[in-house]
Image (spheres, rainbow, N blue to C red):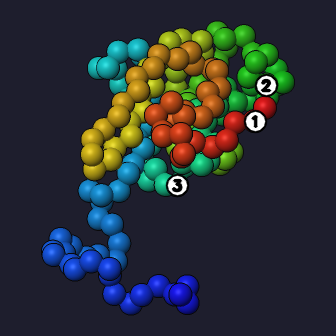
């Protein structure tokens, strides 16, 4: 045996369903992240981010917060960071980061320390997997999608 691949298949071809140089949108896996102003499904969406799952599958995806206005961000900086600012002084905007890069920012601000809703949807040709979570504004949330992905697609955990 020469160790080469044969130029034909070992079995006869019965049917070819389709051929394409690239996948169409219906065949792509996507992740859709939304943040709402309150904890209800009917509350206003303030952050909406959709991307191909292949772009974030082995990356660090985080939800964090920045000042809702320039004055809010100046106040955060003057106090030495978000953890040191009294909650009643500022409003925050959620943002999605991938490996530390800002990918999406909310259109409106939220009060600090309130409960609001985060929805994560993994959309595939076979169906949609959805996680609905109520979180506190002002806390940083790491690896938003980790609970949904199959084990072989999750980034390794550090000891």
Residue 63 in the image: x percent, y percent?
58, 32
Looking at the image, tell me whether mark 3 or mark 1 is earlier in sequence order: 3
Horizontal arrangement in the rendering, residue 56 relative to residue 47 (left or right): right
In the rendered image, is residue 37 in sight? no
Residue 23 in the image: x percent, y percent?
33, 66
Residue 149 in the image: x percent, y percent?
48, 39
Q: Where 73 falls versus 133 (above or below)?
A: below
| Quadrant that contains the C terminus | top right
Residue under label 1: 158
Label 3, label 1: how many angstroms apart (C-alpha)?
A: 21 Å
Q: Secondary structure at mark 2?
A: loop
Looking at the image, tell me whether mark 2 or mark 1 is earlier in sequence order: 2
Residue 91 in the image: x percent, y percent?
59, 21
Horizontal arrangement in the rendering, residue 136 relative to residue 126 (left or right): right
Within 10 Å of disc 2 (Cα), the crowding (few <14, some 14-19, many 20+) is few
Residue under label 3: 55
Badge number at residue 81: 2
The mark lying in front, picked from 2 and 1, is: 1
The mark lying in front, picked from 3 and 1, is: 1
Asked if the residue at tag 3 contacts the one at tag 2, i.e. Cβ–Cβ closer than 8 Å, the answer is no
């Amino acid at each position: 045996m020469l160790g080469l691949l044969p130029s034909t298949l070992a079995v006869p071809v019965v049917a070819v369903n389709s051929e394409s140089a690239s996948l169409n949108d219906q065949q792509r896996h996507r992740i859709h992240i939304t943040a709402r102003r309150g904890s209800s499904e009917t509350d206003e969406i303030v952050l909406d981010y959709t991307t191909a799952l292949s772009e974030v599958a082995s990356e660090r995806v985080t939800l964090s917060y920045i000042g809702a206005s320039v004055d809010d961000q100046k106040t955060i900086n003057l106090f030495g960071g978000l953890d040191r600012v009294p909650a009643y002084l500022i409003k925050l905007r959620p943002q999605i980061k991938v490996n530390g890069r800002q990918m999406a920012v909310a259109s409106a601000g939220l009060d600090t320390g309130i409960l609001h809703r985060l929805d994560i949807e993994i959309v595939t040709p076979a169906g949609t997997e959805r996680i609905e979570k109520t979180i506190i504004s002002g806390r940083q949330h790491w690896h938003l999608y980790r609970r949904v992905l199959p084990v072989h697609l999750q980034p390794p955990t550090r000891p």
